[in-house]
Image (tube, rainbow, N blue to C red):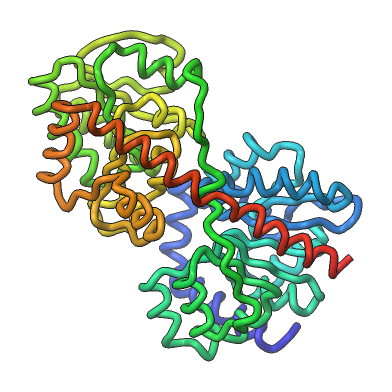
Amino acid sequence: MPGAQVLLDLLYCSALAVGSPWCAWKLLTRRKIRAGLREKLGGVPRRSGPPCAWFHCVSVGEANLARELIARFERRLPDCPVAVSCTTDTGRAALEKHLAGRDLFYYPFDLSPAVRKTFGRVRPRCIILIELELWPNLLLTARDRGVPVVVINGRIEEPNFRRLSHVRFLVAPLLKTLRAICVQDDVYARRLVDLGAPPERVLVTGNMKYDAVRTEIDPGHPACRAIRGLGPGPVVVGGCTWPGEDEILLRIHKEAAAAHPGLRLVLAPRHAERLPSVERLVEDAGFACRRLSTLKMHPGSGENVVVLVDTVGELDAVYAASDIVFVGKSLTQHGGHNILEPAALGKPVLFGPHTENFRDAAALLLDAAAAVKVDSEAGLREQITQFLAAPAAFAQLGTKAKAAVAGRKGATERNLEVIESIVASCA
């Protein structure tokens, strides 16, 4: 085993030894960490047939991006099988729902024995990493075995760039192992070149999120019907909310509902483990909480109801049932969440000041006067109040948002052309 990998394993094992009580506690108490543990240690099912294209998706967002890309890849290269990995349990659920029939497995821990075992069982012809999930042992193993690695939809945010700049001497050799790095925009391209990526391998191909978002949802979708079945009043959705944002939306809703009794609020917390605590918040605010899974099976109406989204893979249908959407993780300092999903459906979109993870999408919508950025709870309250007073004016925001998203499509095809050329070169 190469010396660099020996050193990496020693570092990982030392960190594990120091943090072993914490790690043991997390394994015992967090189901999502235990999920796929055997596969994460290299015990993935052994593939048969020819070498494959290994696509890696970290979680749900990347899995959604991969759907269309993989479908097109299989149509264009039917003789190259596909295997898909993920890191999280929610990502695995998304893969099983949308990419069933392929070889699906959990991404290995970056320990060289687990990585080598995974390589031996998966037998990749090439590896496609969606966004920028780079682990040293995997990249070094791929290099040593002659397996090309491609990054697509790559991005590197300013905080990560600053941190990695301090260890450029470690980062640069890893970036040089990559056959191609397809990034979302020029800013990310410059950052990666500054970190040591060969400039000729860094390609600006655009953001696949514009291609992945759906522009139409069947109004007969069970989630749409369930939410709209609560009554004819306007629907406000808080999507991908983080702690603190649910409380803000509930306070605003309580005030607004007093003047607009038909108003409906739907909360979709970002993490499923928060559902019980958000349910308590709803009840403490004086509302009846209906989980979406229950509401779909037992439709009903009621003016005092707040819907809590507890299902996976239906957020776009929830957005489709809305009249206005606040996208969370943005009033708190966590970088924002995907504002393109409601925008592509033609919904008026509100978001907070923290959109670092979706900087280009936020800039696109704001430049097109197709969304509204709020700086605080007071600003969000003001915008929702204005919406209730003049919903037609906000509907124009949604129309502009849908047009803006449509104008940015095409990254999936450009990335696919890069992947095709590399697969052909390693036939």
Q: Give residue 342's quadrant in the image.
A: top left
Query: Is residue 266 depicted above or below 95 in this figure?
Result: above
Residue at 78% x, 79% y is 144
Residue at 47% x, 67% y is 20
Nearest the eye: 21 or 166:
166
Query: Is residue 338 depicted above or below 383 in this figure?
Result: below
Quadrant position of the N terminus in the picture: bottom right
Query: Is residue 239 depicted above or below 53 in this figure?
Result: above
Task: Tell me if I can see residue 272 in this picture.
Answer: no
Asked if residue 36 lies left or right of residue 264, the reply is right
Asked if residue 234 lies left or right of residue 157, the reply is left
Nearest the eye: 106 or 401:
401
Please state the horizontal and vertical placement of residue 424, each as a whole percent of the image.
Answer: 85, 64
Task: Tell me if I can see residue 121 in this picture.
Answer: yes
Count of all numbered marks drawn on residues in the image: 0
Asked if residue 379 lies left or right of residue 206, the reply is left
Please state the horizontal and vertical placement of residue 94, each as a whole percent of the image.
Answer: 58, 40
Residue at 68% x, 79% y is 177
Quadrant position of the C terminus in the picture: bottom right
Nearest the eye: 252 or 233:
233
Please state the horizontal and vertical placement of residue 53, each as a whole percent of the image.
Answer: 77, 57
Query: Is residue 83 depicted above or below 400 in this figure?
Result: below
Please state the horizontal and vertical placement of residue 141, each as a whole percent of the image.
Answer: 73, 75
Residue at 50% x, 29% y is 216
Asked if residue 403 lies left or right of residue 57, the reply is left
